[in-house]
Amino acid sequence: MEAQLLELFGFLNDSREDIRKLAAENCAGLSKATDLHPVFGHNNGAAIKRLMEMIADHPLIAHDAISAMVNLSANPDLVPYFNNEGFVAMLVITIILPDSVLADLCCMLLNNITKDEAIAKLLIPEVDAKEEEEKLKRRFNPSPIVPKTEETTTTINATGESEKPIRKTPYLDNLMEVFVRPNTLATKAQKEEGEEPETAPHNPNATYNFLAGVFANISMVPSGAKALRSRSNVDNVIRLSKLLPFLNHEGGWDSIRRGGCMSAVKNCCFDVQDETTGGLLLSTELNLVPYILLPLCGPNDFDDEDIDNLPEDLQLLNLPRLVNQLPTSV
């Protein structure tokens, strides 16, 4: 079987589209067999690297190639082959493109490979204390004269003069923006309840639920947790605050989305002493405590004194309420 599989890999480079499609389709099927995974790692992962290149092929071919990589990336021994900045950038682009039919598959793949710390670090922007102070000022004192703080690069032309800075939005911010926008399932639920959605989904072909796992993986890295506790380059809002609404067990959120967000929040709470971002965890702006306590609040009666000691958001809950029944999230 090994010899036939190695022969199959050769067809991934064929000039004919139909042959590449058939080869990728077979790789997707065979990659489900975990005992064949070591064969994909032969020749320094040549087959995996070819599958990575096929993400830019015809969408049908790319779909099969990504499906194969999702299966293969579940094997920790093969994950290091995916440590390629250009490939990670391509995944991010495919995820954030409107109407991308491959977005959710790429989210699944990114979720798998970012369990490797080296790959997760490719998505993490640096956090600068001075820049955080500027973002805070612009968050609460926006000015049309002063542009928002952005991560930029400056190029030098042939005459030695610096050219206009080129805007660079961190991968993490790009992924968060599509994650928090209304998705197809949320829009459908609103329509079923007789509500008219305020905005159309960014991508009707994707839910982006597996990005929650990506954020959870990022939060496992100290620099990643720090980045989540810092402010977004898009709107100067604390990045972690964008995940908090998905902690609500009564919001009807997908368990993958909710579980990933809970893990990210939990991991970000381990370093409250961080001088740059630790103080934000206890800030009134983030208002984290009610989101943590809400799943534990049921229809029980409390004394007036106890109620007054609760955060304001928990004092006037609509009854009846159900305590979260998922043990792993309590």
Image (cartoon, grey):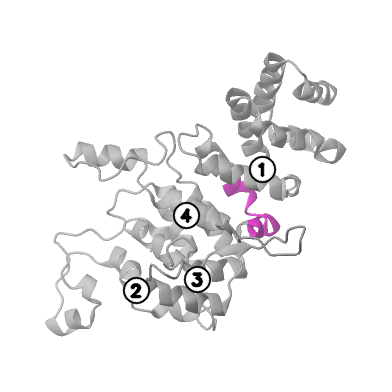
Q: How many marks?
A: 4
Q: Earlier in the sequence, mark 4 or mark 3?
A: 4
- Read off the residue under disc 3: 230
Q: Label 3 vs label 1: CA separation? A: 30 Å
- In front: label 4 or label 1: 4
Q: Dividing the picture into quarters, in which one does residue 158 lie? A: bottom right
Magenta stretch, main secondary structure class: helix
Q: Is residue 190 above or below residue 307?
A: above
Q: Earlier in the sequence, mark 2 or mark 3?
A: 3
| Label ID, residue 57 | none
For the C terminus, the quadrant is bottom left
- Read off the residue under disc 2: 289
Amino acid tagged 3: Ser
- Read off the residue under disc 4: 176
- In front: label 2 or label 3: 3
Q: Is residue 19 above or below residue 289?
A: above
Q: Dividing the picture into quarters, in which one does residue 165 lie? A: bottom right
Amino acid tagged 2: Val
**Visible residue check, residue 92:** yes
